Amino acid sequence: MSALRHPRVRVLATLAVATGLLSGAAGAAELKKIAEIPIPGEKLISFDISFIDQKTQRYYFADRSNKAIDVFDAKTNTYIGRVPGFVGAVLKADNTCCNNAKSGPNGVLVAGSEIWAGDGDSTIKVIDIKTMKIVDTIPTGGKLRANEMTYDPKDQVFIIGNQNDEPPFTTFVSTKKGHKVIGKVSFPDATDGNEQPTYNPADGLVYHSIPELSKDEKKGAVAVLDPRKAALIKMLPVDNCNPAGLAFGPGGNFVLGCNADGDKMPAIITIMNYKTGKVVANVADIGGADMVTYNKKNNQYYIAARALKGGPVLGVIDAKTNKLVQKIAITGGNPHSVASSETNGHVFVPVGAQNNGCGCIQVYAPQ
């Protein structure tokens, strides 16, 4: 039986509103939780990135607890099945969860007719969408996890970062037959790894978050890379942010998921412009973030602010005004991943089972 032929799991709908609209945000669409999608198998404790294929409305989720990529229907909010064969959640030396540097799957995306995912053994797993089976394993040459990724569909180049190796590096792989490794870029001055790379179709370049330079936690950067040449073009400096997630929005702007949580640096989310390389806005009262995304249909940025003081939230920023319009409190473990559908505007946030979390995928919709 195909991995996709699992019985569909009933969506647990909810009418509860997580939080109200922030003051001064009149006219902005408010999100409300509309469903929770249960995840079968092992209790969800460890997980990483999630991704929606906008063409098929399939939602792919890096489920370390079940050593698999889980697959959902983003139109009906239902679980479809999973693709096993990953390292899973690796315990720390004291047998507690988890050693993220060796765990997987991590990043995941769709490239053509294949799913590409990074694993904890420093390899890339390639999955055939039709058979839902792993058809290739590509070593990156590192010792620790292959992490976050992006895809250049024009040149058919896949880009993935090895955050935990020293020094961290980024690998460029052709998605054409043979899956040839084109080259690598090393970041010797990146003393806290490299985070989310994102392809910019407007200029054909890749923008890659670098949280920290030369052990100065207040100095980060965005590396600008040429995916065709596997080359570093320049570094855009970013202060007081520790950038993690990165997503492009309107007008040449991109949002950074600043990990700064209000302790040593103010809790902010930074929005920059790729044309000028300058900061457009520092959005206050939201930070401690990992993954971020932009939804064109809703014209909003969504922020998975797992480490915000006072508790984790899903942040909503109006991409027209660059103003924070909503903070939705989330109960549960490590809600650091977020993806959204351009078809129905729904927003998907995985939540772990620890700390009274649902161990599910929470689904939000604009009202």
Image (tube, rainbow, N blue to C red):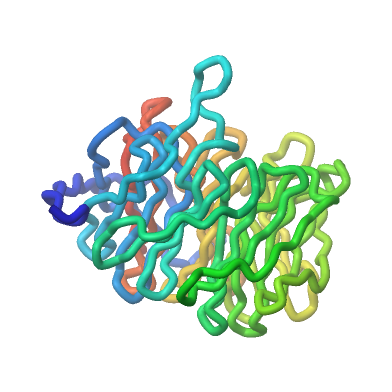
Seen from the viewer's position, the closer of residues 250 and 234 is 234
Q: Position of residue 324 (x, y in %)?
A: 58, 58
Q: Relative to 319, does residue 10 appear above or below in the rendering?
A: above
The residue sitting at 66% across, 71% down in the picture is 206
Q: Position of residue 294 (x, y in %)?
A: 51, 67
The quadrant of the picture occupied by the C terminus is: bottom left
Seen from the viewer's position, the closer of residues 299 and 20 is 299
Tell me, yes or no, if residue 241 can be seen here.
yes
The residue sitting at 23% across, 39% down in the picture is 40
**In the image, 3: left or right of 109?**
left
**In the image, 24: left or right of 128?**
right
Q: Relative to 167, does residue 275 appear above or below in the rendering?
A: below
Seen from the viewer's position, the closer of residues 35 and 156 is 156
Q: Position of residue 366 (x, y in %)?
A: 36, 63
Q: Relative to 126, does residue 273 appear above or below in the rendering?
A: below
Q: Position of residue 151 (x, y in %)?
A: 53, 71
**In the image, 141: left or right of 213?**
left
The residue sitting at 55% across, 73% down in the picture is 174
The residue sitting at 36% across, 50% down in the picture is 69
**In the image, 148: left or right of 252?**
left
Tell me, yes or no, if residue 271 can be seen here.
no
